[in-house]
Image: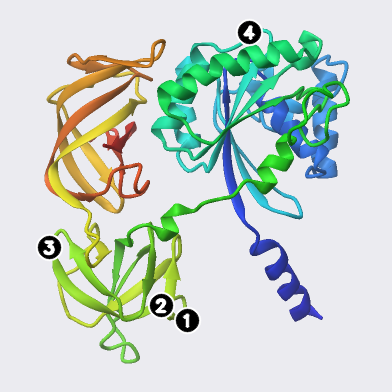
């Protein structure tokens, strides 16, 4: 009976598709309330959580249950009624599993939006129907474009406060299409909703019969997850070299890491970068199993037929699909720290599994978030600003462009004294 239960659970829940999505929008657009409504209406909230939020709502003097409290967990968030840090929530429906990143709307927390959206398959961008598109709408749309998020759902919220007007919805949709064209966003869908009342969130709205499209939940459950990394060029950043000192595994030498692109099969010809040494895959292991093939994002250990020099930070790639190798890196960077980025300053550079040191040689352009245009760069970059920069690294990096591969196309800048994360970069 126990084995049957485990098998049913494995086949039913663990094998379902996983959709990671993020919410973004200006302050008080209703991001946390929307997530609370999704969780509440999809019956994804435990009874003790429900009672705790009901009690917290009463203590705060709310006439009804404050759905935003399901995600706003920090005390300061509850006091101010805003989201400060990224809140992650996990839930599942019979069709799909979800990880939600609820990100802040304030300008000073733009860095948190970048963090929450960095692994997202989809972005839900909220717009207050009373206010239309704002500066933060542009900022978050630009970041979604920069992070190459493949799907965008624009939820025009608080439709109950504009009498569920179709004209208001269409006007905002028309203005947002200008943003879509400027940023070359694809796969953009629009939904008129009321997160507070639940209209078009999980259930169809009786108040907006003019809208005949899908509800938000239906879109989230049915949108096709491309997982293009599975079909991209094969990339395996080496995280650890496994060389056991034991009689049982006397000759074992394996290279452990997580596949960040493509499929790896036993017998595949591979090249180790940056050295360029070639070999063939002798075996693929995962825990105590030997595999014939592995898929992104499997964590595996690879054995090669040749005894060659492979170290942490190297990347094993497929023959004929080599990544770039260079010490001169061009990247778009979002600066996270109150201390500005300075030209000619030295930073620790973390890229995939490699750590090195780099100097910022120049700030080429900065992004004017109001016009979405690039402007000439200076000698410093302030917190939450986005710019294209040039970095010179002490050791060569093995990389792809960010749009091609998120893992091998991204890097972070770290303070060498405090080890704080200072900025996130997307390699151009």
User: Which of the marked residues, 1 or 4, is nearer the chain's N terminus?
Assistant: 4
**Mark earlier in primary sequence (1, 3):** 3
Looking at the rendered structure, which numbered label has been put on residue 285? 2
Read off the residue under disc 3: 275
State if disc 2 and disc 1 touch (CB < 8 Å).
Answer: yes
Secondary-structure class at tag 3: loop
Mark 1 and mark 3 in contact? Answer it, CB < 8 Å. Answer: no
- Counting residues from the start of the chain, the first of labels 2 and 4 encountered is 4
Give the image location of residue 343, x and y in percent. Answer: 15, 22
Say which of 216 and 26 sits in front. 216
**For marks 3 and 2 on the same chain, the one whose residue lies earlier in the sequence:** 3
Residue 289 is marked as: 1
> Residue 381 at x, y = what percent?
27, 18
Badge 1 marks a residue whose secondary structure is: strand
Quadrant containing the C terminus is top left
- Calculate the distance from the C-alpha at mark 2 to the C-alpha at mark 4: 55 Å
Judging by the rendered image, the residue that carries numbered circle 4 is: 131
Please report contact status of discs 3 and 4: CB closer than 8 Å, yes or no: no
User: Could you tell me which residue is drawn at 25 percent across and 87 percent down?
Assistant: 251
């Amino acid at each position: 009976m126990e084995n049957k239960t485990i098998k049913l659970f494995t086949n039913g829940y663990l094998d379902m598709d996983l959709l990671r999505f993020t919410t973004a929008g200006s302050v008080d657009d209703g991001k946390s309330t929307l997530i609370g409504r999704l969780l509440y209406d999809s019956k994804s909230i435990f009874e003790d959580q429900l009672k705790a939020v009901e009690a917290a709502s009463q203590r705060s003097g709310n006439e009804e249950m404050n759905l935003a409290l399901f995600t706003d967990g920090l005390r300061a968030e509850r006091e101010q009624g805003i989201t400060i840090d990224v809140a992650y929530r996990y839930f599942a429906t019979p069709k799909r599993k979800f990880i939600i990143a609820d990100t802040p709307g304030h300008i000073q927390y733009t860095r948190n939006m970048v963090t929450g959206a960095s692994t997202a398959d989809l972005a839900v961008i909220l717009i207050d129907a009373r206010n239309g598109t704002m500066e933060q709408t542009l900022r978050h749309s630009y970041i979604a474009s920069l992070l190459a998020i493949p799907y965008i759902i624009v939820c025009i919220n608080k439709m109950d406060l504009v009498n569920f007007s179709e004209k208001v919805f269409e006007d905002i949709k028309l203005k947002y299409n200008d943003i879509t064209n400027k940023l070359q966003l694809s796969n953009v869908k629009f939904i008129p909703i009321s997160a507070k009342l639940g209209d078009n969130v999980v259930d169809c709205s009786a108040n907006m019969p003019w809208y005949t499209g899908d509800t938000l939940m239906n879109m989230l459950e049915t949108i096709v997850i491309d997982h293009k990394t599975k079909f991209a060029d094969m990339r395996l950043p080496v995280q650890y070299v496994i060389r056991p000192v034991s009689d049982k595994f006397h000759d074992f030498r394996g290279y452990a890491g997580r596949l960040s692109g493509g499929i790896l099969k036993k017998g595949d010809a591979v090249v180790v970068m940056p050295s360029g040494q070639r070999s063939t895959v002798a075996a693929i292991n995962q825990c105590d199993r030997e595999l014939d093939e592995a898929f992104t994002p499997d964590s595996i250990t690879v054995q090669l037929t040749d005894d060659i020099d492979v170290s942490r930070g190297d990347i094993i790639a497929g023959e004929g699909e080599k990544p770039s190798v260079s010490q001169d890196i061009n990247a778009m960077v979002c600066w996270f720290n109150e201390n500005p980025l300075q030209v000619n300053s030295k930073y620790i550079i973390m890229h995939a599994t490699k750590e090195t040191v780099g100097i910022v040689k120049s700030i080429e352009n900065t992004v004017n978030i109001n016009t979405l245009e690039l402007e000439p760069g200076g000698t410093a970059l302030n917190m939450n600003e986005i710019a294209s920069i040039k970095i010179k690294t002490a050791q060569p990096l093995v990389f792809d462009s960010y749009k091609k591969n998120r893992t091998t196309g991204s890097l972070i800048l770290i303070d060498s004294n405090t080890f704080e994360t200072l900025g996130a970069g997307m390699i151009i």
